[in-house]
Image (spheres, rainbow, N blue to C red):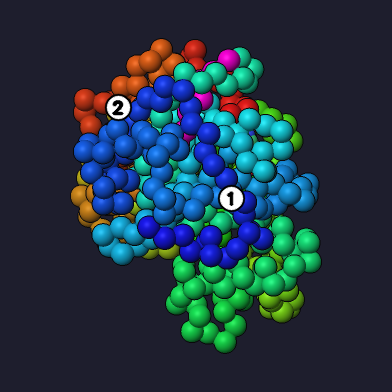
Amino acid sequence: VVNQFAALGEDFFSRVEPAPLTNPKLVDVSPEASELLGINTEEHGESLVQMLNGEELPQSFDIFAMLYAGHQFGSWVPQLGDGRAMTLAQIENPAGELWELQLKGSGPTPYSRGSDGRAVLRSTIREYLCSEAMHALGIPTTRALALIDSDTPVYREEVETGAILLRMAPSHLRFGNFEVFSSRDQPQQVRALADFVLEHHRPELLDNEAPYLQLYRDVIHRTADLMSQWQAVGFSHGVMNTDNMSILGLTMDYGPFGFMEAYNPGFICNHSDQSGRYAFNQQGDIGWWNLAALGNGMLSLLDLDQAKEAIQEYKSIYQEALLTRHLAKLGLVLQREGDGQLIEDWFKILQQQSIDFTKAFRALSHFCLGSDTPEALEQLFTNSGDFRHWIERYRIRLAEETTSDAERQQQMLATNPKYILRNYLAENAIARAKQGDYSEVTKLREILSRPYEEQAENEIYAESAPAWATGISVSCSS
Ligand code: AMP
Ligand code: MG
């Protein structure tokens, strides 16, 4: 157990103590995350609950809440910080990697700004399930080891119960950690943070005459790629403030996120986002905006012209990454003129006919040149004329490829997931958990850990939202 970040000193955080919940109950543990840490959670069940509840923590833990600032919905907020998250320690796993453990919901900190420092069961289940589901989809993300529920009342729109998530990442540093010190005109602290990231997370960049510029470019590349990955699975983060943007390019701080069902590029998952600043089709541009804010925050370390040049590359990196992912989703290996149009027209049909994004790509994955259009694919479309016209163009385009039907199918089924965390599935698991039955959380976690497999017994979890659930919107109150 170490804590390298704590060694940076108290300019960067405040030491805190977790405030335990009453009657903590284990909801679920992620075996994949446990394995990553090299711990046997079955053996340590009781001590795991105690650790999540912040009780009897090892002496070697040096617990703190981080200081950061951020741009929230475009407006500058000079001070934020972990208002309900606490870093416990870094644990070295058997592979020699360091994983930083954080509790979320473990009580107030100096950065709670008058709020209670708690997280309710509902939002904790959502973050837990989505972290592990994103990982299984192959998308960079913070991980989640386990969560507990309790009898502690927490007051939101109604009384709910307090929960705590144990999340983990190589580092939870955000763009906002840099922004807070640059806004206070503290370039030494900005430099210390950059040095920290370089030394502990990107040592390969130190071998360069301009390591800070390389670090900035690294974040630009990773963020562009992350945005393309979100677009490729229909994921909408919902609150892309700079304090929710990871310096390592991880998806983090799951709040009112949503997976799009019926394809709608303007999809807004967060009902507090009236202007649609963080709508699905804005995420690529917002990535750029946030990176510009980071560049500004790192400016004391960068040459202005070089920083501008670096961020100018973002748009082409993002567009290229997105095109590559879209081509892969269609099973196209070669790049041909007209592919962009083919992709665009496919999305146009999905949008006009409100077709489920995930189901459409999954059904298309079963298309074979050697046989008729699969019935399950054709049945998704209400205006079959437009669809048939498009599929004939697709057939002609596929004929130019050199891959066999079988190879393409295998590649597409490994690219287009069958199971995603649909909102109504999460809502179902949450409703049961509120009654004290946590089994659906476990079941969903298991299904979503194999998103590309058929799982015949779980077919119904691949369905779009039933009518009762299509109106669910998710708020920031969590
Ligand atoms: P978020 O929009 O969830 O990323 O939160 C924005 C800021 O508000 C972060 O600094 C959070 O730590 C803080 N925050 C959110 N909810 C609470 C809460 N219940 N108690 C204390 N701080 C909170
Ligand atoms: Mg946040």
Q: Nearer the viewer, mark 2 or mark 1?
A: 1
**225 in relation to 116, above or below:** below
Label 2, secondary structure: give it: helix
Label 1, secondary structure: give it: strand
> In the shown orientation, is residue 188 left or right of residue 366?
right
Which quadrant: the C terminus?
A: top right
**78 in relation to 9, above or below:** above
Q: What segment is highlighted magenta in the picture?
A: 159-165
Residue at image position (69%, 76%) is 302
Q: Of the residues shown, which amino acid type is indicated by label 1?
A: Arg
- The answer to whether residue 139 is visible is no
Q: Nearer the viewer, residue 302 or 186?
A: 186
- The answer to whether residue 398 is visible is yes
Q: Position of residue 246 (x, y in %)?
A: 55, 55
Classified by dominant secondary structure, the portion drawn in magenta counts as strand
Which quadrant: the N terminus?
A: bottom left
Mark 2 vs ligand 1: CB under 8 Å? Answer: no
**231 in relation to 362, above or below:** below
> In the shown orientation, is residue 93 left or right of residue 391?
left
Ligand 1 shows up in the quarter that is top right
Quarter of image, res 446? top left
- Near mark 2 (Cα within 10 A), the count class, few <14, some 14-19 or many ≥20, is some
**372 in relation to 67, above or below:** above
Q: Earlier in the sequence, mark 2 or mark 1?
A: 1
Q: Position of residue 379 (x, y in %)?
A: 36, 25
Q: Of the residues shown, which amino acid type is indicated by label 2?
A: Lys
Instruction: Provide the residue designation for mark 1.
Output: 15
Q: Position of residue 233 (x, y in %)?
A: 45, 43
Number of marks in the image?
Answer: 2
Q: Is residue 163 rendered magenta in the image?
A: yes
Instruction: Provide the residue designation for mark 2.
Output: 443
